[in-house]
Every structure is written in C-alpha cells, then in structure tokens.
C-alpha cells in the first residue's frame, strides 16, 4: 500500500502545471481572484488561495493576463483577463497537454497487462 | 484598526517591493474580505471566519515571498554543489596551514607549549571565517541572480573507480606512528634516558659514537619505511615489487642493528660505569645476542607474514 504522503506528493507534482492552464482558460471570461478560485474549485481544480493570488500577478507581469480595476461594486476588485499573448501561449500548452494524454493512452494500450 | 486582517496585511506587505505595495494591499484586502464573506454566508460567525481565512492564507512571509517571487532558501540547487566543493576544498588545508604557521611562529618566539593552543584557536577562527564568508558570497549570488558560469559537468570528471583495498587505513596509520616514534626515540634517548651520571647529567643508552654514521643511516631507512607505507596504501594491495622493497628495507634496518649488537658497539660504554650489571662482559654479550636474535625473529616473522599476504592478494 502506497503511503498517503507519497501519493499526495505525486498528485501535487502532476497538478502543478495545470493550474496555469486552467486559469488561462477560465479567464477568457474576466474575473477577480476569489471568484476565479471558486470557479476553479467547482470545476475540479482545487487551488490554494496563497498560490493563486500571487500566480495571477506573476502571469500579469509576464503579459499573459491583462487587468482592470472595477470600482462599481461594494469593494474595489481587480479583474483579470487572458491576453492575446496568453491565448497563444494557452494553445501551445493545451496542445502539449493533449500530446501527453495521447502518449499515455498509447503507452497504456501498448503495454500488456 | 488593529484587526487581524490589518495585522496580516501589514505583515505581508512589509517585505513586498514598495512600488507595488498599495496595489497588492487593495487587492489582497478585497480577496480576504471576499473569502470571509464566503464563509459568513455559510453561517460562520465573522470572527471565526476571519481566523479561518487568514489561517488558510498561511504565513505572511511565505505569501510575500510568492508575491515578490523571492527564493526561500539560502543557497539553491544551482549553486549548492559548487558551494559544498569549495567549502570542502578550502577547509581541507587552509585552517591547518594557518594554524601550523602561527604555532611555529609563536614557538620560535619562545612561547613553548602555549604555541600549540594559539595555533588551534587561530585554526578554529579561520574555519569559522571561511564558512561564513563563502556562504555569504553564495547567498548574495543566489539573490542577485548573477550569471555565474557553473562549469558544465563532463564525463572526463569521473573519478577513477575505487581500488578494492586490501590494506586498511588503520594499519597504515599504526605503522607510520610506530616508525615516527622510533625515529623520535633515537635523538630523544640521547638527551633523556633516565640513567644519570653522579652529577645528574644524562647518559645516552646508545653509544654516542654511532651518531657519526650508523644512527643517521638507520633514521634514513626509517624515513624510507614511512614513505613505503604511504605508497603501499596508495597502491591499495600487496604486490611482489612491494614485497621486494619491504625485504630490502627490513634488511637495511636489521642487519646493521644485529651486527652492532653482536660486536658490542650498540650500547653506550658509559652505562657500564653506572650500571654494574652492564659492566660484566658476559652480560653484555648475552644482551647483544638477545637483541640480535629478537630483531632477526621479528624480521623473519614479518617477512613470512607479508609473503603470505602478497601471495593471497596477487592470486
């Protein structure tokens, strides 16, 4: 039986890169930090708040996201949206994700059980 | 207001770069409020919700480091191995070297045994300094992200595969220590033999006349034996060439010793004046014979033992 710790570490490794992909997809529709966190969680991407908030700023610094302050509501919120650059990067990442999935499928079929 | 949230924000923003501080503050405060609201909507009371949210966000220093993209390590994997290698290299000889030099200088100034203590203290200081400054340098390189050309690893750097050692280090050290003690004894007995003249002066055990040739010659043989032990350890096992050298060295030491003992030239004639037992010629002959036979027996036994080892290890 695999220990819980080992399993958790491997799952974490597997999930690490997908948070960026998921955020870039989700932010095709502009949203602010907490709402994005909720949406990602609802869609099966549980992310820690202390990971997501700094990540959004980093992606913005890299030009993959644009942002806009919305001051009309009860509290000022910063809305992020996937930029054109982010979009082209996203398509590369999605291609790679699909390629990984295809490779794994091929490998599973090719190996006798 | 000294609420938990305010304290949390202050703690986080403290180590975030100033230009972005206000913006991050506004956004983070809104996010925290959103999170608290999300919980109070579910029926949790506000104070508990605030605690839970801040606990979930975790240590503010970690969060700040993530915002600033700062590294939470003194020396990361890029430089760690280089740092470790330099540290080992520098510590392997500099403290000992400096400590020895200082001790020698102190001793030359007549400080006596205190010089050794001074040498050790200086060596310890040097060790601490090397460790501190080297680590500081690497920590700065790590943080400034200076491009340092870490040499690429190539297959040519592979060390030789370790020789299978049949000669334990402990044996080599024991042999070298014995040889050095023997070398040290020869001059030592000349000045301190615990046999005294009537006026309190020291009587050497070995004939001082031997210093004109035989004792220096024996010391040369012993020094050669020390070198032999080190070479033997480097090679790692007995070979017939080593065995041959060992035979020569043993004979070069034993033959003069046996000959001197049998011809009654080994002991200091002055001893006879103080020790009546030595004064009798028969006793001196018996003693010389005992030394000669003992030496021969040790040499023969040693050579047989070595020959057996050599045959086993070259097989």
Image (tube, rainbow, N blue to C red):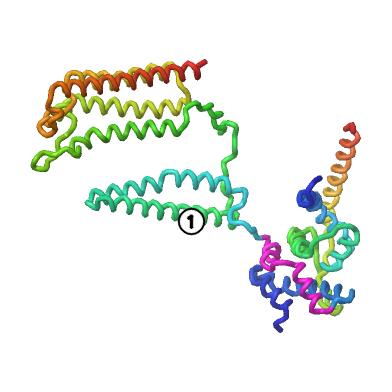
Question: Camera-side residue: B239 or A59?
Answer: B239
Residue B78 is left or right of residue A62, and the answer is left
Question: Camera-side residue: B43 or B315?
Answer: B315
Snapshot quadrant of residue B67: bottom right
Snapshot quadrant of residue B10: bottom right
Residue B196 lies, in percent from the top left, at 14, 39
Q: Residue shown at 62%/56% (left/top)? A: B73
Residue at mark 1: chain: B
Q: Tell whether position B46 is magenta.
A: yes
Residue A112 is left or right of residue B203, and the answer is right
Q: Is residue B245 visible?
A: no
Q: Tell whether position B189 is magenta.
A: no
Q: Is residue B294 above or below residue A107?
A: above
Q: How many marks?
A: 1
Snapshot quadrant of residue B51: bottom right
Segment tinted magenta in the rendering: B45-69
């Amino acid at each position: 039986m695999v220990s819980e710790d080992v399993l958790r570490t491997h799952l974490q490794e597997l999930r690490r890169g997908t948070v960026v992909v998921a955020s870039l997809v989700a932010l095709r529709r502009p949203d602010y930090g907490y709402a994005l966190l909720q949406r990602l969680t609802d869609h099966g991407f549980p992310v820690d708040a202390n990971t997501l908030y700094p990540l959004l700023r980093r992606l913005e610094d890299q030009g993959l996201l644009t942002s806009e302050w919305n001051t009309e509501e009860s509290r000022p919120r910063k809305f992020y949206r996937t930029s054109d650059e982010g979009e082209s990067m996203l398509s590369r990442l999605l291609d790679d994700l699909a390629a990984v999935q295809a490779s794994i499928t091929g490998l599973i079929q090719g190996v006798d059980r | 207001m000294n609420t938990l949230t305010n304290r949390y924000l202050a703690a986080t923003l403290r180590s975030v770069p100033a230009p972005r501080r206000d913006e991050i503050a506004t956004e983070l405060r809104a996010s925290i409020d959103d999170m608290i609201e999300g919980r109070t909507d579910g029926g949790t009371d506000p104070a508990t919700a605030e605690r839970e949210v801040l606990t979930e966000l975790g240590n503010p220093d970690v969060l700040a480091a993530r915002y600033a993209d700062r590294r939470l390590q003194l020396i990361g994997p890029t430089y760690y191995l280089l740092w470790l290698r330099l540290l080992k290299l520098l510590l392997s000889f500099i403290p000992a070297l400096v400590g020895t030099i200082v001790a020698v200088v102190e001793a030359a100034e007549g400080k006596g045994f205190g010089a050794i203590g001074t040498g050790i203290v200086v060596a310890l200081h040097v060790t601490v300094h090397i460790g501190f400054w080297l680590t500081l340098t690497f920590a700065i390189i790590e943080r400034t992200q200076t491009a340092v050309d870490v040499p690429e690893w190539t297959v040519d750097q592979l060390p030789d595969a370790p020789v299978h050692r049949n000669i334990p280090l402990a044996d080599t050290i024991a042999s070298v220590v014995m040889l050095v003690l023997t070398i040290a004894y020869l001059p030592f007995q000349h000045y301190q033999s615990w046999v005294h003249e009537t006026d309190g002066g020291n009587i050497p055990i070995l004939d001082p006349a031997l210093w004109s040739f035989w004792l220096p010659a024996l010391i040369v043989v012993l020094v050669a034996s020390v070198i032999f032990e080190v070479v033997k350890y480097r090679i790692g096992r007995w070979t017939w060439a080593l065995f041959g050298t060992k035979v020569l060295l043993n004979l070069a030491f034993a033959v003069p010793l046996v000959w001197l003992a049998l011809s009654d030239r080994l002991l200091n004639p002055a001893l006879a004046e103080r020790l009546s037992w030595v004064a009798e010629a028969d006793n001196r002959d018996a003693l010389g014979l005992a030394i000669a036979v003992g030496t021969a027996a040790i040499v023969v036994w040693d050579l047989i033992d070595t020959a057996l080892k050599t045959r086993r290890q070259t097989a």
